[in-house]
Image (spheres, rainbow, N blue to C red):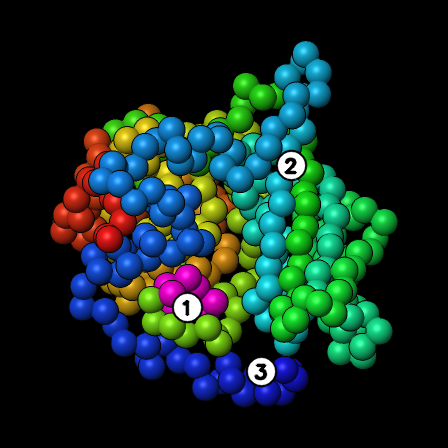
Amino acid sequence: MSDIVQKEKEKEFSIELIPEPGDIEDVIFSLMVNPNLSTVNYFNDFSEKGISPDSIGDSDTDESGIFELDSNGRCMAMSTHAFHHHLQSNPQLATEILISRAARKMLCFGARPIAISAFLYHINIADPNGHQIASRAKKGLEIAAATFGIKISDRKIRFDHFSGHGPVPPTLIISMMGLIEDKEKLISHRFKKKGNNIFMIGKSKSDLGSSEYLEFYHNISDSPLPAFDLKNESVIQGVLKDLNEKELISSASPVGKGGLFFTLLRATIPNSLGFDITTDAEIRKDVFLFGEAMGRIIVDVDNEKEDEFVDVLSELKVPFFTLGHVTKGEIRIDDASFGYTDKMTQSV
């Protein structure tokens, strides 16, 4: 698809054209069976058992692996990420988004991203269009890596092409390595205890681009990339480093697949907790809960550290939103109860 055709399609897309669901609970349980969100449900278990914390989020670093380097607490972190949305029409921006997501995720548990390698699958480098995709993806890789201070292996993207793949869209897969100076200072995506305050660092946007909600619930696969600004992403990630160093946050999770709701669910299930939040009155509720705009991080903060946490963000003039607090297990949104996390099973 050419850039002109894609831009015309994006101009045609509007949230106003997406019907607002009357029942948020229906959306939640519909998305629970989405294979891309199966890490927060029993997608492969059709029994009547509830979700087991032992089967979900069993790593303190979610999708990353930790390897101890020495006896002084230094560790190496590794993670792998893939992306295919708009890689043909806007490979540079798509690549910048992928690198930003990977770096933000790694920073959320206290690792400093230091190196990255990339592999571009299902692309014919001999084809002019394939060459353009590769060239612009490489540019996006270099720009994002320079922004976050990450080294690139060989400063190029490796390729894979096989005609037997058929009509498979180009996919960029990256591996990121990070350094942890002291494993004792690692944090995780898990909310720690009832009563902690929940904040969102960054600003919500009225955006549904390339979201699981849009594709899986509304069956719309052709939409713009999620709202993204590389400079803003760099600022948010810098603030996260500062908060980690000051030990002001108990957990951190990047808003990712499934949007804010599923990010919160991933944070609550491992310790059998819940959340009570208030949505932003200026943004449509389904957009606020399920949109996947970039540049947002969910943290929980101990009550004793709340004032200092707020002071740091205020001094740095970084936008943040007070979502609510961690509960013993109930999920509440705008004073309405959506049950308990241990009952969040798929509908069959």
Say what amino acid the circle numbered 2 marks.
Met
Say what amino acid the circle numbered 1 marks.
Glu
Q: Is mark 1 on a helix, strand or loop?
A: helix
Quadrant into which the N terminus falls: bottom right
Label for residue 78?
Answer: 2
Q: How crowded is mark 2: few (under 14 residues within 10 Å), some or many (20 or more)?
A: some
The reply, left or right, for residue 252 in relation to residue 279 is right
Q: Does the magenta stretch include residue 121?
A: no
Say what amino acid the circle numbered 3 marks.
Gln
What residue is shown at x 51% (from left), y 73% (from top)?
224
Segment tinted magenta in the rendering = 208-216
Q: How crowded is mark 3: few (under 14 residues within 10 Å), some or many (20 or more)?
A: some
55 or 348: nearer the viewer: 348
Q: Mark 3 points at which residue?
A: 6
What residue is shown at x 18% (from left), y 63% (from top)?
23
Residue 282, horizontal then vertical, whole percent = 29, 66
